[in-house]
Amino acid sequence: MYRGFKISFDEDPFETNEYLQGLARHALMQDRIESTLDAYLDINGVLNASKMQADWFPQVKADVFISHAHKDKDLAVSFAGWLHVAFGLSSFIDSCVWGHASVLQARIDKAFCYNSVTKTYDYTQRNYSTSHVHMMLATALTRMIDNCECLFFLNTPSSLTIEQAVKDVGKTLSPWIYHELAISQMLRPKKKTRERRFNRFGEKHYESLEKSDLQIAHHVDLSHLNTLDLGDLIKWAEACRSQTGADTLDVLYDQSPPRNDNRLYS
């Protein structure tokens, strides 16, 4: 990862064709593995986590990583479509792998945690399985963020509540948004030379929580992310009318210089 941005939308400004473009590209990344868990068992009956991670959370080459709340999935898809139409940029939408985690979790729990006699799940076993699946998901997300050149965080009321008293600090109820923003702040930025920015790594969603459900708020620091609005995106697109591909990101970087981030390479 080289740069990160947070984008605020008052409403979805994108056209239907941009949504459809994003949907088509999103679908390409959502193919699920249909093999049984038997394919991952060794002779001792132990699941091969490395093979499961490679199959269920594959790494794909993308220019940008889009972080968003579950309720903003359509907005994220439209934004990805707009980035492709306007700049020829490929996007990785984080919800592509959320569904994979849920399906994999259900398969493991049914095979190893469910008691068909009592029709209940073993609490300890399910905690153990959940920790492994979530660790695989967190690792996959971290690698994708590090792999992508740029991160866009869709800063909406569904994803984050900005605290009035402290600038660039907010709260989120999503553990995955918390993880992605924290990782994007901790990762050492790649050098600006494009060919050296990338390293060697090549459906049930989480529902929003009702007030009666458990809610855990995570404080997140946004000070490393430049702020963009719709006007900034339009300005960027207008400046790139004759350009396409990853080089268009350089135009965005020039229009929105780093915020005194000493971590960035010049």
Image (cartoon, rainbow, N blue to C red):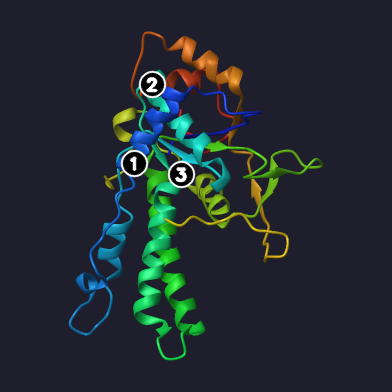
Q: Earlier in the sequence, mark 3 or mark 2?
A: 2
Find out whether the residues at labels 1 and 3 contact each other: C-beta distance under 8 Å.
Answer: no
Q: Earlier in the sequence, mark 1 or mark 2?
A: 1
Q: Earlier in the sequence, mark 1 or mark 3?
A: 1
Label 2 crowd bin: few (<14), some (14–19), many (20+), radius 10 Å: some
The kind of residue on which mark 2 rests is Val
Foreground label between 3 and 2: 2
Residue 7: image x %, image y %?
A: 59, 31
Residue that numbered label 3 is attached to: 188
Residue 31 in sight: yes
Residue 113: image x %, image y %?
A: 41, 81
**Judging from the image, what secondary structure is the residue with disc 3 in?**
loop
Q: Residue at x 27, y 58 (%)?
A: 33
Q: Residue at x 36, y 13 (%)?
A: 243
Q: Residue at x 23, y 76 (%)?
A: 41
Residue 208: image x %, image y %?
A: 61, 54
Query: Residue furthest toward the right?
Result: 165
Q: CA distance from mark 3 to mark 2?
A: 30 Å
The kind of residue on which mark 3 rests is Arg
The kind of residue on which mark 1 rests is Ala
Foreground label between 1 and 2: 1
Q: Residue at x 67, y 41 (%)?
A: 157
Residue that numbered label 2 is attached to: 85
Residue that numbered label 1 is attached to: 27
Q: Is residue 197 left or right of residue 134?
A: left
